[in-house]
């Protein structure tokens, strides 16, 4: 079977499905490029309000293909460096994409699959889903921004536990730690993620884009810098057509329909 990233649509939500069932939806360079391309196309299309990333079948993503990594050991280091750059381009595209990105996780999210889920704005996981930073188990170190995401979200000791011990952690514990937004019954993660994406799609796209950008920049700003950024976004959104639509709908007790 061909390993690929499949793009489909559910209403105003674009669904990106990691399809590599022969290798438990392991990732590869073709998927990275396809992910960047899909998000670039969706960014300019007003018909797409949110994106859901999921895996084919009962597994989200097993991370990197170890057989491919073994092969790359026989090649110049630049070959693997270029592959990781491709993954990182996709991760950066997700983080800077101005629309909400939701991960729908069934089964295992391992290695770069865990990193990929962490790169999304929201995570919906089946109750029996399992997450693991598997790198140290095969004498490797993290990629895909996994160490960055965990360091941002968790105390150092907890991030160290996940990265250094490489032990499995369940979705319920990750929710308790604040890394999973919603728990779904087994087999329902995608349906629940689509429902969440639909809710997001009913909000003003410009306001969500501002919220995402503000969150992304917050840790690198001083309070003074961030207050100025909040001011500029607020004024811009107030004078956006959707600002008028939202305020009038609230005052008139109506459901807003945003542009």
Image: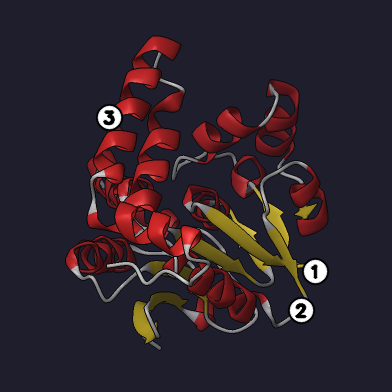
- Disc 2 from disc 3: Cα separation: 43 Å
**What is the crowding at mark 3: few (fewer than 14 residues within 10 Å), some, or many (at least 20)?**
few
Residue named by callout 2: 186
Residue at image coords 42%, 58%: 100
Is 24 positioned to the left or the right of 92 in the image?
right
Residue neighbourhood size for the residue with mark 1, other residues' Cα within 10 Å, grouped as few (<14), some (14–19), many (≥20): some
Can residue 257 be seen in this snapshot?
yes
Q: Residue at x 27, y 63 (%)?
A: 39
Q: Residues within 10 Å of mark 2 (few under 14, many from 20)?
A: some
Q: Are marks 1 and 2 in contact (CB under 8 Å)?
A: yes
Residue 87 in view (yes/no): no
Q: Name the residue: 76% across, 58% down.
A: 171
Residue 128 at what x, y percent from top left?
80, 69
Query: Marks 1/3: CA distance?
Result: 43 Å
Residue at 52%, 41% (x, y): give it: 146
Q: Which image quadrant for residue 4? A: bottom left
Q: Nearer the viewer, mark 1 or mark 3?
A: 3
Going from N to C along the chain, the mark reached first, 1 or 2, is 1
Q: Is residue 160 above or below residue 194?
A: above
The mark found on residue 232 in the picture is 3
In this rendering, position of residue 5 left or right of residue 170: left
Q: Secondary structure at mark 3?
A: helix
Q: How is the image coloured?
A: secondary structure
* Mark linked to residue 193: none
**Mark 2 or mark 3, which is nearer to you?**
3
Q: Does 38 appear above or below 239?
A: below
Q: Earlier in the sequence, mark 2 or mark 3?
A: 2
- Picture coordinates of residue 122 (x, y %)? 56, 55
What secondary structure is marked by label 1? loop
Q: Which residue is mark 1?
A: 128
Q: CA distance from mark 1 to mark 2?
A: 6 Å
């Amino acid at each position: 079977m061909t390993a690929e990233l499949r793009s489909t649509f559910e209403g105003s939500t674009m669904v990106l499905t990691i399809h590599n069932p022969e290798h438990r939806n392991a990732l590869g360079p073709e998927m990275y490029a396809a992910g960047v391309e899909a998000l670039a196309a969706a960014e300019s299309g007003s018909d797409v309000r949110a994106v859901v990333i999921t895996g084919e079948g009962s597994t989200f993503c097993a991370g990197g293909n170890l057989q491919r990594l073994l092969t790359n050991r026989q090649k110049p280091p630049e070959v693997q460096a270029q592959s990781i750059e491709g993954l990182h381009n996709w991760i950066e595209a997700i983080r800077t994409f101005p629309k909400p990105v939701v991960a729908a996780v069934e089964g295992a999210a391992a290695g770069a699959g865990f990193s990929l889920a962490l790169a999304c704005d929201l995570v919906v996981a089946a109750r029996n889903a399992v997450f693991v930073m598997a790198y140290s188990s095969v004498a490797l170190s993290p990629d895909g921004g996994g160490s960055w995401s965990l360091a941002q979200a968790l105390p150092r000791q907890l991030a160290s536990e996940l990265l250094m011990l490489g032990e499995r952690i369940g979705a319920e514990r990750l929710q308790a730690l604040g890394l999973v937004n919603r728990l779904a019954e087994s087999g329902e993660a995608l349906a629940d993620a689509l429902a969440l994406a639909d809710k997001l799609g009913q909000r003003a796209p410009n306001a969500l884009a501002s919220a995402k950008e503000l969150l992304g920049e917050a840790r690198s700003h001083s309070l003074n810098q961030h207050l100025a950024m909040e001011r500029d976004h607020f004024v811009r959104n107030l004078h956006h057509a959707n600002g008028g639509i939202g305020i009038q709908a609230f005052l008139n007790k109506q459901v807003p329909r945003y542009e």
